[in-house]
Image (cartoon, helix red, strand yellow):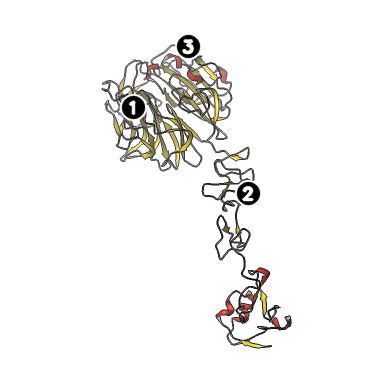
Amino acid sequence: MRVWYHCSQAMRLGILAALLSLSACIRPSKVVGVVCDSASDCVLGSVMGTCESTGYCSYPDDSCVGGSRYSPGAGEGLGGTCVGGSVACGGADEPCCGNVCGANLACDATSMTCVCGDNTQPCCGGTTCGANLVCGEDTRCACGGIGQPCCGGNACDAGVSCTAGTCAAGATQVAVGMGHACALRPDGSAWCWGNDWKPWATSRPGLISPTIASIAPKPIAGATNLVAIRASEMSTCGRKMDGALWCWGHNEAGQLGNATNTSSSVAVQVMGLSNVTLFDGGRHHMCAVGSYNGTAGVWCWGRGGQGGHDGGTPDATLGRLGNNDVMDSNVPVAVDLSAAAPAGQTVRALSTGNYHSCMVMSDNTVWCWGKGGSGQLGNGAVANAKVPVKVNLAGITIPNGATIDEVSCSDGSGFRGGSSCLRLSTGAVYCWGSGTEMGDGTTTGRNAPTTAVTTTGLGAATFKQLAAAASTRCGLTSAGDVWCWGSNNHGILGINNPMGTTQSTPQKATVLTGATQLDMSHNTACAVDAQKRLFCWGSNRRGQVRINATAALQPTEVTL
């Protein structure tokens, strides 16, 4: 039987594209095979249809079960429907229902099929992924990120290395406080662990309430896009890419610099400070080189003249902020540079320790301020100073063309005294102050630098970075090794010797090789190596080293 069928909307309901193009006509066109006796009745142009058992023609359509659809003109309610029923869609490996799929499935734009389990796809069943993939917190399969499987078994995101099949980014920098530590990760985030509380601080109740209290490293909210981190005793600061400084932790003395005395477990911005180039943390104070409200200089904030943790009467001679005052400040105040930079000298290096700070100027002079009872200010006296005083360098030799590239202040308990060290561009190191930290084979204290730290064990290597704890010093060498001297409280020398063994010359820390950055505080030390692995040693009383012991006598890898 032959019928005439004119162009209509019904003809456009999913028949094969060839049929649609034939039916999109300007004048009526002849349609063959609405009803049929044989396949020859179902020929439409170059398209061969099928005469179904119902007596109606069907035509090819891959979206249908069985691959064919009834002609739109078929009777008995069959017109335009799939032969054998509607197409199955939305399930795993089934066609997408439009662009929609079932739970834990996504529509692949290329195949228009519902898929799961591959990279960036939903986790199958909400939990399962393919090889070298992990189901992330967003229930999508992922690889290449920190702590995730290596993509293809060997590739990771930028700045993250593949170690034993896992992208173990670890850290690019580490900062150590009294009872906590923080790691800067390749993505610019800061993760901290330990416990930053002071159980005997009766006159400052806030100190017994920790802002960091987790053995497992946790990210710090707001601490993002960081390029450097430094810790004070119970707080930490990070410099962002835009030169602003953000801090978190305890704030009883205003050491967060945000015009409050409220501690914070999330990062807060130091008020008015910008273009920061150098910064460091001490006992309850921080210092930085940058601009405050548009004025360039050296700025400090936090604890001023009081010696300990409490808020007692300030020592009238002790000014840790370097501004000729002894009062605390919760916003940056200017360090008095009238003597240190009368001709516009700039700051080359800065260090802030337990009760004193030092800086190296562009004219190769060194200036210190704060507590000086152990000679740590280096000016030939054993007295405190509220403004920077010049270190007497007459007792050392600086070769022609050499520069003083670094200064390092002791960081820890004040009852152990204090010390300072400087490092020349040649790698030579000179220390002064408390005797156990001189590193020259003696335990004789001094109030100005005289004798260089012994380096006979270093071979051809030279020191390229210094770090200080309460009564211990360490230096990172050009060979990537760490050498330490001074007190061995809690095994902080890292030499796997019994605690309490004092060393008057540098000793090489065991296990650790290829180190790239180093930090210390009180009785704990940490270092990062070239593979971005993190190692810590010394006191673990508050979980800084993350081991099942109170101390680590040698560098121990910390898993982040």
Q: How many marks?
A: 3
Q: Is residue 403 left or right of residue 341?
A: right
Q: Nearer the viewer, mark 3 or mark 2?
A: 2
Q: Is residue 459 left or right of residue 267?
A: right
x then y, percent, for residue 435: 43, 14
Q: Residue beneath label 2, please?
A: 130
Q: Which amino acid does label 1 sit on?
A: Ala
Q: Residue beneath label 1, please?
A: 340
Q: What residue type is labelled 2?
A: Gly
Q: Classify mark 2: residues with Cα within 10 Å, few (<14), some (14-19) or many (20+).
A: some
Q: How far apart are marks 1 and 2 (CA)?
A: 63 Å
Q: Which amino acid does label 3 sit on?
A: Thr
Element type at marker 2? loop
x then y, percent, for residue 74: 63, 81
Displayed quadrant of residue 7: bottom right
Q: In this view, does 36 lie to the left or right of 417?
A: right
Q: Residue beneath label 3, please?
A: 442
Q: How far apart are marks 3 and 1 (CA)?
A: 31 Å
Element type at marker 3? loop
Q: Do the residues labelled 3 and 2 touch (CB within 8 Å)?
A: no
Q: Classify mark 3: residues with Cα within 10 Å, few (<14), some (14-19) or many (20+).
A: some
Q: Nearer the viewer, mark 1 or mark 2?
A: 2
Q: Mark 1 or 2 closer to N-term? A: 2
The answer to whether residue 367 shows anywhere in this view is no
* Quadrant in the picture for the N terminus: bottom right
| Residue at the image point whose x is 27% and y is 23% from the top | 312
The answer to whether residue 428 shows anywhere in this view is yes
Q: Which of 128 and 181 is in front in this view?
A: 128
